[in-house]
Every structure is written in C-alpha cells, then in structure tokens.
Image (cartoon, helix red, strand yellow):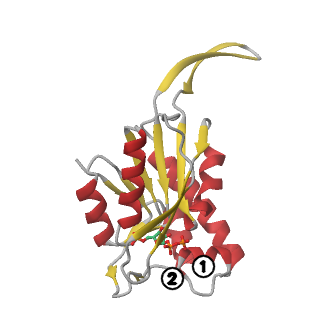
Amino acid sequence: MSQVFVSRHPLVLHKLTALRDATTDHRAFRDLVRELALLLCYEATQDLTLAPKTVSTPMGLAQGYKAEETIGLVPILRAGLGLVDGVMELLPNVQVWHIGLYRDEKTLRPVEYYNRLPTEPTVQICLVLDPMLATGGSAVATVDILKRWGVRRIKFLGLIAAPEGVARLTAAHPDVPIHVAAVDERLNDIGFIIPGLGDAGDRQFGT
Ligand code: PRP
C-alpha cells in the first residue's frame, strides 16, 4: 500500500517557495535544502522504534526512550548530497551510503556509476534522499538496489515530485512511503518538473 506524504507545515511551504525562486543564489539555496531536509525528516520519522531508557536527572530518575534503529541515509549523487547534513543533524544513529546515478539526457533512464554497499545490510531502515522525483527512474533503481542489499524498510525523502514520478515509484515499490514538500503539475518534454525549481544539482553546486 503506497503512502504519499506532502508536508503542509508552514515553514516547509515558506522555505520551498524561496527555494523555487530563480533569484535565490547558490549559498541560500543550499541552506534552504538543508533546512527543508531537516523538517521533512522530522515528519518522515514519526514511526521510529523506541526502547525504554532510564536516565538520572539532577533530581532523580526519569523514564525515557532511546531510538533504537540504525538508519541508512542513501543520497543519490549528486543532488541528494544536499539533503544529508540536515537529516544527520536530527537523527541519532545514521550511516551514509552513497549511490551514484545520473539520468541519461536522451533516454531519461538512470545510469549507475557508484555503489560501494557491503555484502550484508548494516542498517534497519533506509531513507533515500534526492531533491527531485521526476520520472521516478532514479528512485526506483535505488530502491531496487537497497532491496537487493536486503533492507526491508525504505522511505523516499525528497523536495519536489512530479505526478509521473510518484506514480512510477508507487507502482514499482508500493511499500515505500514518499515524503516530499510538493507534488507539482507535470514533467515537460525533457523530463524537468514544472514549475519545479530548475536543476537541483546545478543550483546547489553552481554548475
Ligand atoms: C536529477 C535528480 C534525480 C534525478 C531525477 O539528477 O537529482 O537524481 O535527476 O530524475 P528521475 O526521477 O527522472 O530519475 P541528475 O541526473 O540531473 O544528476 P545530478 O544529481 O548529478 O545533477
């Protein structure tokens, strides 16, 4: 059963609007990507498993909790890199596993160029990080890789999706929840999200 979560948080909507603005420069763009990642991560991790934990306060014992699972952050290179820092600020136990994919400009199909996953999975949950879910090809390929690795719980965390990308990821992996700040109108004929924000990699890295 697929689940698509589009944030309605006022701070997300405010920052997303600034992110889309063509006059936002690279430095501000990167800051916004980091902040949005943090906010969306907060919403995407509401079902983390907790174990009881007792701590000593200056006044006595308090019964509390500890987040138990080790979470794998899987940024899709290169644009996904910008989402890592914000998520890492928030989560206690993380490992970062990079997956290198680029989208062939003619076919729009993802081409894998980097994958150094060890043989056995070392995390309980994976968060796939990519600002853009356009055709969905890159996200589907990444989830394919993670499922082959042996990870059972996988979520996608992005900034802007096209309806086409949501449909494709949902059809291929209905068990993977999709957390984004917006689902836009459509893809154009060269695979860009409309109205979107342009090229998330280029806008982060000044290329
Ligand atoms: C962009 C984006 C996604 C992909 C989305 O990356 O960051 O990874 O395209 O498209 P899809 O949903 O149609 O697969 P791009 O290939 O431009 O590479 P980059 O991150 O290196 O800029």
Give me the residue at 63% from left, 73% from top: 204
Give me the residue at 52% from left, 50% from top: 41
In the picture of the structure, the residue carrying the numbered disc 1 is 202
- Would residue 45 be seen by someone viewing this image from the given angle? no
Residue 66 horizontal/vertical position (percent): 57, 25
Q: Is mark 2 within 8 Å of ligand 1?
A: no
In the picture of the structure, the residue carrying the numbered disc 2 is 198
Q: Is residue 179 left or right of residue 31?
A: left
As helix, strand or loop, the secondary structure at mark 1 comes to helix
Choose between 135 and 28: the one closer to the eye: 135
Q: How many marks?
A: 2
Instruction: Measure the C-alpha gap from mark 1 to mark 2.
Output: 8 Å
- Residue type marked 2: Gly
Q: Which quadrant would residue 118 be assigned to in this image?
A: top right
Whether the residues at callouts 1 and 2 have beta carbons within 8 Å, the answer is yes
Q: Which quadrant would residue 188 be assigned to in this image?
A: bottom left
Q: Tag 1: Cα neighbours inside 10 Å, few (<14), some, or many (≥20)? A: few
Q: Is mark 1 within 8 Å of ligand 1?
A: yes
Choose between 105 and 70: the one closer to the eye: 105
Q: Is residue 160 left or right of residue 177?
A: right
Residue 180 horizontal/vertical position (percent): 42, 61
Q: Nearer the viewer, mark 1 or mark 2?
A: 1
As helix, strand or loop, the secondary structure at mark 2 comes to loop
Residue 91 horizontal/vertical position (percent): 60, 41
Choose between 110 and 124: the one closer to the eye: 110
- Residue type marked 1: Asp
Is residue 176 positioned above or below 52 on the image? below
